Image (cartoon, helix red, strand yellow):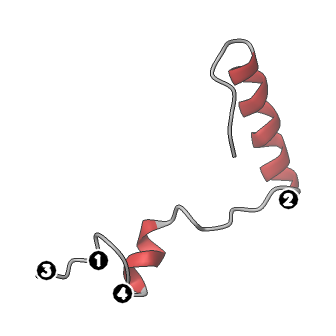
């Protein structure tokens, strides 16, 4: 998602996104959930030493 970076578009975008999430029309893909990524034991930042 590429949100706008200028007012008043930022405010309008956030309000619309919040309404859509509450209505259930926008779902979180979970792609940004580092906790789920770490729990699966993969990728950077999973606590394992490299090298």
Q: Nearer the viewer, mark 2 or mark 1?
A: 1
**In 3D space, how far apart are the residues under numbered discs 2 and 4 (Cα atoms)?**
30 Å
Q: Quadrant of residue 38?
A: bottom left
Identify the residue position indicated by label 2 in the image.
24
Can you tell which quarter of the image residue 45 is in? Answer: bottom left
Mark nearer the N terminus (2 vs 4) = 2
Give neighbour class at mark 4: few <14, some 14-19, many 20+ (Cα, 10 Å).
Answer: few
| Residue identified by numbered label 3 | 49
Q: In front here: 4 or 20?
A: 4
**Side of 9 where 45 appears, left or right:** left
Q: Give left or right: position of 51 versus 20.
A: left
CA gap, disc 1 and disc 3:
9 Å
Report the residue marked by disc 1: 46
Residue drawn 43% across and 67% down? 34
Q: Is there CB contact under 8 Å for labels 2 and 4? A: no
Of discs 3 and 4, which sits in the foreground?
A: 3
Neighbours of disc 3 within 10 Å: few (<14), some (14-19), many (20+)? few
**CA distance for labels 2 and 1:** 31 Å
Residue positioned 69% across, 26% down in the render: 4
């Amino acid at each position: 998602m590429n949100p706008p970076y200028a007012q008043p578009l930022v405010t309008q975008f956030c309000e619309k996104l919040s309404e859509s999430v509450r209505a259930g029309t926008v779902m979180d893909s979970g792609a940004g959930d580092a906790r789920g990524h770490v729990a699966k034991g993969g990728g950077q930042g999973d606590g394992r030493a490299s090298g």
